[in-house]
């Protein structure tokens, strides 16, 4: 019994059953097969991840490198479709005002979606400002895409930058459904975000270029305007003159001038001859206004040499400038006067400009100097009235443009004619010189507007004072 048991034990321990050995071998084979499959899966995922990273890196590099928005947006459908492994993609960008940017519509494949692109480009709602910011209209476009690809699986996401809708991105496959993982969704959103940044960058760049063009125009306009204005007041017998133009942020159409009606004379003979004083303003701003005033300045200087009275000067100037002003859709206000130092007679005519203010030293009061007349360029056969006064010693005449009275204050109100008259009265009562009066007027205007605030329009003032002394102030 003992020997049998021992023999049986030895048999069991040294010769395992055949069936147990086959099961173990089969298990080892299955384990090896599972390991290989898992290793292949990891390799596949690693390859896919590496490929996706390269695609996203290429798109990011293009964003940094491309200056052409169209070329960059062409890549968006390509990268989006390859990231998910689908048939195609569609990008519908929006302009800064929310309208569909028809020139930059992108699709892959293009030929198969040509009709869809045509329908999107011709959407009546898409031509309206604010289309991209209206959720209902975006849903309408989504349904249009879905109807066109009725058998396709479609994934849609918004192209957003700085909280604003910059477009719509669609990926689709007409052959089979494609379940999207969270990683796929994040990748597609990243592509959409890069597209949004590209659109935002391009619009910012265009805005910068527009401002640069405006700055160049303002610089040119400022140079033209500076050349129009005299840099020094002339010496006229018995008269003090002072003048200044305070430019606004934008170049305006202010203009003033002193013109000898006998330019061939020199020295004291010229000082005693008749002079023309003019102040005007072209409606509008920028380079066009400056160019129009340059044209009118040349015409006016030629008319002055004719020696005609002020009403005829404005009548002829209006007819000469009619065609040019009509084409530009602009008008001009102009106050023209001539002065004879020997008689102290001032003749004047007004083409709807702000009437100059006249301080009468004898009466110690201010009145307006005005005459009837229409804007230059408004009516071809317009007639102008002509006035005439004798200026007495101590009298002060202030010419100004509407940039003075229309200047806004810190409280939102305008400087107004009443403040201008009050300041002029105070200065004249103190018997100040012409330049001192002008300095006080501008000082009062600056306090009203605020030292650190910019004028909305040019503010120009010319001051004439009848005085025994002669001065030659520099225009500031």
Image (cartoon, rainbow, N blue to C red):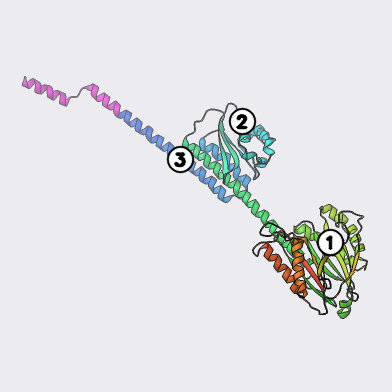
Q: Which residue is mark 1?
A: 334
The residues tagged by marks 3 and 2 sit, at their Cα atoms, a distance apart of 33 Å
Q: Which residue is mark 3?
A: 49
Assess disc 2: are there few (<14), some (14-19) or many (≥20) residues with their C-alpha within 10 Å of its C-alpha.
few
Which picture quadrant has residue 281?
A: bottom right
The residues tagged by marks 1 and 3 sit, at their Cα atoms, a distance apart of 75 Å
Q: Tell me the residue at 13%/25% (across/down).
A: 10
User: Which quadrant: the C terminus?
Assistant: bottom right
Residue 255 image point, x, y percent: 80, 64
Please tell me whether mark 1 sits on a helix, a strand or a loop.
strand
User: Which quadrant: the N terminus?
Assistant: top left
From the viewer's perspective, tell me whether residue 162 is left or right of residue 475.
left
Q: Nearer the viewer, residue 291 or 340?
A: 340
Which of pointers 1 and 2 lies earlier in the amino acid sequence?
2
Residue 29 image point, x, y percent: 31, 29
Assess disc 1: are there few (<14), some (14-19) or many (≥20) residues with their C-alpha within 10 Å of its C-alpha.
many
From the viewer's perspective, tell me whether residue 186 is left or right of residue 74.
left
Which picture quadrant has residue 232?
A: bottom right
Residue 133 image point, x, y percent: 62, 40
Q: Which residue sits furthest top?
A: 1
The residues tagged by marks 1 and 2 sit, at their Cα atoms, a distance apart of 61 Å
From the viewer's perspective, tell me whether residue 137 is left or right of residue 342.
left
Tell me where the magenta segment starts and ends, as one range.
1-27
Q: Which residue is mark 2?
A: 143
Instruction: Say which of marks 1 and 3 sits in front.
Output: 1
């Amino acid at each position: 019994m003992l020997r049998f048991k021992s023999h049986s034990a030895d048999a069991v321990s040294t010769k395992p059953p055949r069936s147990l050995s086959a099961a173990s071998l089969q298990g080892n084979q299955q384990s090896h097969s599972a390991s290989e499959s898992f290793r292949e899966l990891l390799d596949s995922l690693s390859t896919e991840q590496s490929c996706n990273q390269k695609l996203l890196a290429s798109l990011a590099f293009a964003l940094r490198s491309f200056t052409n928005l169209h070329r960059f947006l062409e890549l968006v459908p390509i990268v989006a479709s390859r990231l998910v492994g689908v048939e195609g993609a569609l990008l519908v960008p929006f302009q800064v005002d929310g309208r569909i940017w028809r020139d930059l519509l992108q699709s892959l494949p293009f030929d198969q979606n040509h009709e869809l692109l045509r329908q999107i480009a011709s959407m009546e709602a898409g031509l309206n400002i604010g289309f991209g910011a209206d959720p209902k209209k975006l849903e309408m476009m989504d349904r249009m895409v879905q109807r066109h690809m009725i058998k396709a699986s479609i994934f849609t996401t918004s192209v957003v930058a700085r909280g604003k809708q910059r477009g719509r991105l669609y990926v689709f496959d007409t052959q089979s459904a494609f379940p999207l993982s969270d990683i796929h969704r994040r990748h597609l959103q990243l592509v959409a975000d890069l597209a949004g940044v590209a659109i935002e960058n391009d619009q910012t760049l265009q805005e910068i270029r527009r401002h640069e063009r405006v700055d160049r125009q303002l610089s040119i306009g400022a140079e033209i305007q500076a050349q129009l204005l005299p840099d020094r007041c002339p010496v006229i017998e018995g008269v003090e003159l002072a003048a200044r133009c305070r430019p606004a942020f934008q170049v305006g159409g202010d203009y003033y001038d002193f013109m000898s009606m006998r330019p061939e004379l020199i020295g004291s003979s010229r000082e005693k001859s008749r002079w023309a004083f003019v102040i005007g303003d072209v409606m509008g701003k920028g380079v066009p206004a400056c160019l129009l005033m340059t044209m009118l300045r040349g015409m006016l200087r030629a008319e002055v040499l004719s020696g005609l009275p002020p009403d005829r000067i404005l009548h002829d100037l209006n007819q000469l400038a009619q065609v040019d002003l009509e084409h530009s859709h602009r008008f001009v206000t102009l106050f023209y006067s001539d002065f004879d130092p020997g008689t102290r007679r001032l003749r004047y005519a007004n083409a709807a400009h702000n009437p100059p203010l006249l301080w009468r030293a004898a009466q110690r009061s201010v009145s307006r100097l005005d005459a009837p007349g229409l804007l230059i360029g408004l009516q071809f056969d317009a007639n102008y009235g002509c006035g005439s006064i004798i200026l007495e010693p101590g009298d002060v005449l202030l010419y100004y443009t509407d940039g003075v009275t229309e200047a806004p204050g810190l409280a939102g109100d305008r400087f107004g004619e009443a403040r201008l008259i009050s300041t002029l009265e105070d200065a004249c009562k103190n018997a100040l010189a012409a330049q001192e009066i002008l300095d006080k007027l501008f000082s009062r205007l600056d306090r009203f507007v605020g030292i650190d605030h910019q004028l909305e329009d040019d503010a120009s003032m010319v001051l004439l004072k009848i005085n025994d002394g002669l001065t030659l102030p520099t225009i500031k």
